[in-house]
Amino acid sequence: MTLTLRHFIVPSSPLLFNVNEHHRLRSRVVVRCVGDDESCESIGISCSCVSSVNRKNAYVSTYDVGEKKSVEDDDEKLEVLWDDGFGSQTTDDCIETVMSLIKNIDGGPPRWFCPVACRKPMKDSPVLMYLPGIDGTGAGLVVHEKALGKIFSVQCLHIPVSDRSSLEGLLQIVEKSVMSEHTLSPNKPIYLFGESFGGALALAVAARNPTIDLVLILANPATSYERSPLLFLPSLVENLSEEHYGMLPYIMSPLACDYIKMAMVKCYGRNHLESLCQLLAGFSKDLSLISVAPQMLPKDTFSWRLKLVKSAAAYANSRLHAITSRVLVLASGRDNVLPSKSEAQRLFRLLKHCDIRVFEENGHSILLESGVSVLTAIRTTCMYRRFSKHDVLKDYLPISFTEFKTSPAESWWYRLYIDAVMFSTTEDGEIVRGLAGIPDEGPVLIVGNHMLMAFDVLPIVSAYLREKKITLHGLTHPYFFHVDVEQEFYIIPIADLLKLGGSIPVSGRNFFKLLANKSHILLYPGGIREALHRKGETGKLFWPDKQEFVRMAVRFGATIIPYGGVGEDDILQLIVDFNDIKRTPILNNMVYRFNQGRTNLRAGVGGEIANQQFHMPIFMPKPLGRLYYMFGKPIRTKGNESIVNDDNYLQELYLQIRREVEKNMAYLIKKREEDPYRSSVERFVWQMKHGLLDQTPTFEP
C-alpha cells in the first residue's frame, strides 16, 4: 500500500467543549488522512469535536464563541498564574468527544486531529502527538487538553472502530507524520505521548528512528502486557457470544476505571459541601462511560486490538536498547490492568535517559483521574524545550493557577502552621506589611539568610506570586535538578516544589542570564552550610569573606534587597545535627556514601562555607510559632556600572548587605515578642472567627 498524506477541510457543527457549559464552540477542522489514494478520496467527514491541525499549508481555524469572533494570536510567553483549564473538562466531555468521533468520522484509515480546547499554542511550541490506548479514539487527553494545548501543537491519532491496520501499518502512519514534522522543523523536538498501547507504539517508533529528536511521555505503557491479566483476555473474548460480550465492559470497568478519582477532577469548590455535591454529580455522569464501551470496542475490534497490544509490546521490548530519546513514564500505583509501577521501574533501569513519576493512588485510566497533572510532570522533570537544546530560562514555564492553588505552600494547614508575616521597606524608609516596598521593575536581587532545611524559601516564593504576580527565581543547588529517582525518591517532592516555584540551578552563567533578562532573583550566600546548620547556630550567617555576586549585580544595575528571616526556633527543634552524625559510625558512613561523586560548589572558598556536605538532620516540629520576614530598603546600583571593577566599592557594598541582613533579623527577634498571634493556637481561634482567607494580624512595625 502506498502511503500518502492528504488534508480535508470540513465544517463542523456546534460543540459543547469549553468552561462555560451554556456556550458552544464552533470551528472548522482539518483531518489528516493517512492511507492509500482511493481510501483518502472516498472519505466524507463531518466532525464536531476537533479543530484544525496548525501546520504549514494547512487551514488554521478561527473560533466562534457565542456571537463574538476571536482570532487567537501566538503568545510570546505565558503569564504567571495562567489558566491551564484543569477541571473544566471531564469524562463527560470525553464521552461526547468519543461519540462524535465514532458517529461522524468513523470509517477509513487512521488520521490525526487537534481538539478544539487546545486552541493555538504559544510561539515556537513543539508538536505533541498523542497515541491512544486500546480504545483508539484519541480522546484520552480531554482533561489535559487546555494545558497542553498552550505549550504544544497537539495532534491526536484516531483509529476508527472498523480499521484493521496492522502494527507495521500503524508504525508507518506515525513515522510518516514524525518525518513530516521533522522536515518542517528540523531543530525542534517532537513529543510522542503514548497511553497504554500507545506507549508501546511510541517506544517502537523511537527505536526505529534514533536519529530524530524525539521526547517520549508514556502513561502506563503496555510493554508489561506479558505480565498482565490482558494476556488471558483474547481467548475469553473469542468464546463469548455477542450477547454476553455486552456485559464484559460492566465487569471490567471497575478494574480499568476509578470513578471516584474521575469525578474528583471537577471538585474545585471552595468548601467541602460544594465539592461533595460536585463529586456526586460527576460520579453519576462518569458511570455512563461504561455504556459507550461496546460502541468504542465491538467484539471483533476488541479482539483485533488485543492482538495489536501483544505485538506492540513484544516489538518495543525487543528494541529498548536502541532507544536514545528522553523518556518520562507516568505510572499508577493501583493499576489493576497492567503492573504499571513495576514496569516503570523496569524501564527506568533499561532505558538510557528515563525519568518516572509514580501516582500511588491512581488507577489505569490515569489521564482521566484527579491528582495527575501531565503539565506538572513535564515541568518538574525539565522535559520541556522548544528547540534542540534546553534553555533554562527561555524554556521555563511559569506556574499555572492550578499548580499554585494545589501547592502544599498554599494549603490551609501549612499556612496556619507557618503563617509567614512579611514586611518590606519603601524607598523613603517606611516599613509596610507585604511586599509593596520591593520594586516591580527588574533586575531585582533579594539576598538573605537561610533557616534550617531551607523551608523559608516556599513562603517567600508564594507571597511573591500571590502579591506581585512575578516569578521569583531562586538560585538552587544543582543536586535538586539531578535527583537519582531510584535511590533518592524522598527528595523528589521537595525538588518538584522548588522547580514549580521557579528555582534554577545556581551557576554564574544562569545568574548572568537572569540579570540580563531583568528577572527577580533569590540568592542565599550561605548555601547549604547555612540551611543545614548545627545546634546553637540558629540565625548565624555563614557567608564567604569576599563577595561572589555583587560584581555581576552592579554590572547589570540590579536593585539589591537585603532581607532577614526568623522563626525557625519557634517551629523546629533540631535533635540530631551534623556533629552528632559524624560521631555515629553508621550514620557517618551513610553520609559519606551519599556525598561520593557530588560536586562541592564552595570547595575552593575555604573556611566554614566550604563544609557543604549533604546530610539529613533529625528534627521535631514544635506546636507553636510563626515565621517573620523583613525586607530592607532597596539598594540601587543603577548608574554605578562604571565602577564594576572597583574592588573596594564592591567589598563595602557586600559588607553593607550583610549588615542589613543581620539588622533585619535583630529587628524581627525583638518585635515578634509584641505579636499577640505568635502562637498557632491564637491564630487558629482568630481564623475560625474571621475566615481562613483573611490576613492574621501581627505586631505594628
Image (cartoon, grey):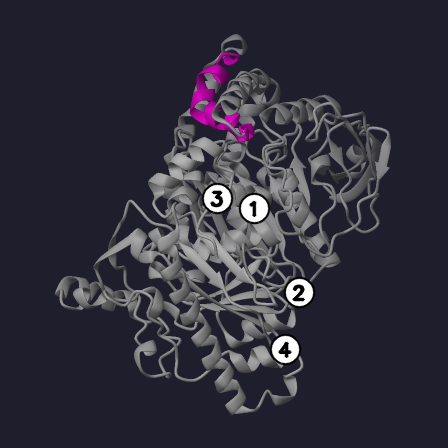
Point 39% across, 83% down: residue: 545
Does the CB distance between marks 3 and 4 fall below 8 Å? no
Q: Which of 457 and 151 is in front in this view?
A: 457
Q: What residue type is labelled 3?
A: Glu
Q: Is residue 605 left or right of residue 134?
A: left
Q: What residue type is labelled 4?
A: Phe
Closer mark to the observer between disc 1 and disc 2? 2
User: Residue 209: horizontal and vertical position, in percent?
Assistant: 59, 56
Does the CB distance between marks 4 and 2 fall below 8 Å? no
The residue identified by callout 2 is 441
Point 34% across, 45% down: residue: 679
Say whether disc 3 or disc 1 marks the residue closer to the N-terminus.
1
User: What kind of element bears circle 2?
Assistant: loop
Say whether disc 3 or disc 2 marks the residue closer to the N-terminus.
3
The residue identified by callout 4 is 556
The residue identified by callout 3 is 410
User: Residue 141: horizontal and vertical position, in percent?
Assistant: 60, 36
User: What kind of element bears circle 4?
Assistant: loop
Vertical placement of residue 249 versus 561, above or below: above
Is there any visible trace of residue 354 in the rendered image? Answer: no
Point 25% across, 66% down: residue: 534
Q: Is residue 448 left or right of residue 133?
A: left
Calculate the distance from the C-alpha at mark 3 to the C-alpha at mark 2.
26 Å
Say whether disc 1 or disc 4 marks the residue closer to the N-terminus.
1
Task: Give the overall secondary structure of the magenta segment.
Answer: helix
The residue identified by callout 1 is 375
Stretch of the chain drawn in magenta: 245-269
Vertical placement of residue 363 versus 422, above or below: above
The mark found on residue 540 in the picture is none
Say whether disc 1 or disc 2 marks the residue closer to the N-terminus.
1
Q: Is residue 574 left or right of residue 376?
A: left
Q: Nearer the viewer, residue 574 or 203?
A: 574
